[in-house]
């Protein structure tokens, strides 16, 4: 029934701000990414309630699940909001979200900052896993190219790019942006040690063509970066298969 309510974003925000049980409002998605909103963009809003308030029948909890072309709402208690994206798909969305209301003296903003920065141990563990996944898909791609399976080589190359991006952002202790926001993110927050233009060109070229030579050149850079970050053991486990992944003499 809530989906039938004639709510606009501005009207709902005014209503939420007037409700003392609301401790935070967080806008995510295109509307929170400068320059990314279009005429088709809705407002994706987290409504954070004081713990226990969601059980009050007269509170804003009744709007949970509201969806319309104008406004999508997620209504949840503070304890649940702390856990969103930790880990999970929403982590990047919240890492670049915009605080609309914070009644916790900056507490909502601090929660978003925590989601935007991976812990050192978490980042190291995830980087190692993504590095191994990247090497796996890269190896399959160049092997398929060698053996005359061009479609398989291109598909594996596309997989390798996905894992590569996860790896590079994990090395910088950041959640990987959704594909829609990759260029936006890198234009404003480049990855240390990588020039954004050449990196995106390589990602686009490898994804489109599966070019084995380009993949090997890219892997050479990644291998050096990964070893400096302490992930040599992951690479060394590949043994002689590394020879197929590296640039040829």
Image (cartoon, rainbow, N blue to C red):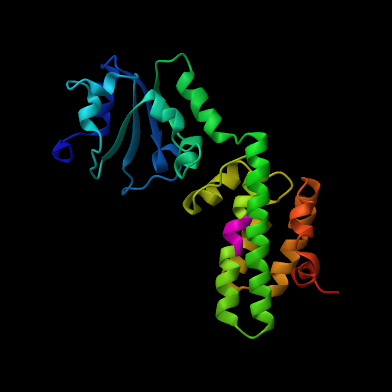
Residue appearing at x 27%, y 29% in the figure? 10
Which quarter shows the N terminus? Answer: top left
Residue appearing at x 46%, y 45% in the figure? 89
Residue 160 vs residue 240, the one in the foreground:
240
As for residue 203 lying within the magenta part, the answer is no
x and y percentages locating residue 216 in the rendered image = 74, 68
Q: Which residues are magenta?
A: 160-164
Residue 218 vs residue 56, the one in the foreground:
56
Dividing the picture into quadrants, the one containing residue 47 is: top left
Where 1 sits versus 133, above or below?
above
Residue 96 seen anywhere in this rendered image of the structure: no
Which quarter shows the C terminus? Answer: bottom right
How many numbered discs, if any? 0
Residue appearing at x 33%, y 29% in the figure? 76
x and y percentages locating residue 48 in the rendered image = 35, 25
Q: Main secondary structure of the magenta part?
A: helix
Q: Please, which residue is most extreme toward the right here?
A: 249
x and y percentages locating residue 124 in the rendered image = 68, 42
Q: Please, which residue is most extreme toward the bottom here?
A: 148
Where 28 sits versus 56, above or below?
below
Dividing the picture into quadrants, the one containing residue 138 is: bottom right
Residue 13 vs residue 110, the one in the foreground:
110
x and y percentages locating residue 207 in the rendered image = 58, 67
The answer to whether residue 204 is left or right of residue 52 is right
Residue 6 seen anywhere in this rendered image of the structure: yes
Residue appearing at x 19%, y 34% in the figure? 7
The answer to whether residue 235 is left or right of residue 50 is right
Dividing the picture into quadrants, the one containing residue 235 is: bottom right
């Amino acid at each position: 029934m809530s989906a039938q309510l004639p709510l606009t974003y501005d009207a709902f925000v005014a209503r939420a701000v007037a409700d003392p049980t609301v401790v935070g409002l967080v806008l995510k998605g295109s509307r929170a990414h400068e320059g990314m909103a279009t005429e088709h963009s809705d407002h994706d809003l987290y409504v954070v309630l004081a713990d226990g308030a969601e059980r009050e029948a007269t509170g804003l909890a009744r709007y949970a699940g509201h969806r319309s072309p104008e406004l999508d709402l997620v209504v949840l208690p503070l304890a649940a909001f702390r856990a969103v994206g930790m880990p999970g798909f929403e982590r990047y969305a919240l890492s670049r979200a915009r605080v609309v209301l914070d009644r916790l003296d900056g507490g909502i903003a601090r929660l978003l900052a925590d989601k935007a920065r991976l812990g050192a141990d978490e980042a190291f563990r995830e980087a190692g896993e993504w590095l191994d996944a990247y090497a796996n898909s890269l190896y399959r791609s160049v092997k398929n190219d060698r053996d005359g399976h061009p479609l398989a080589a291109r598909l594996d190359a596309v997989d390798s790019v996905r894992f590569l991006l996860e790896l590079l952002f994990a090395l910088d202790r950041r959640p990987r942006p959704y594909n829609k926001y990759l260029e936006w993110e890198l234009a404003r927050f480049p990855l240390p040690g990588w020039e954004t233009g050449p990196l995106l060109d390589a990602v686009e070229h490898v994804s489109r063509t599966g070019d084995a030579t380009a993949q090997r050149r890219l892997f050479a850079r990644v291998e050096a970066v990964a070893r400096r970050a302490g992930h040599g053991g992951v690479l060394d486990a590949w043994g002689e298969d590394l020879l197929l992944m590296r640039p040829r003499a």
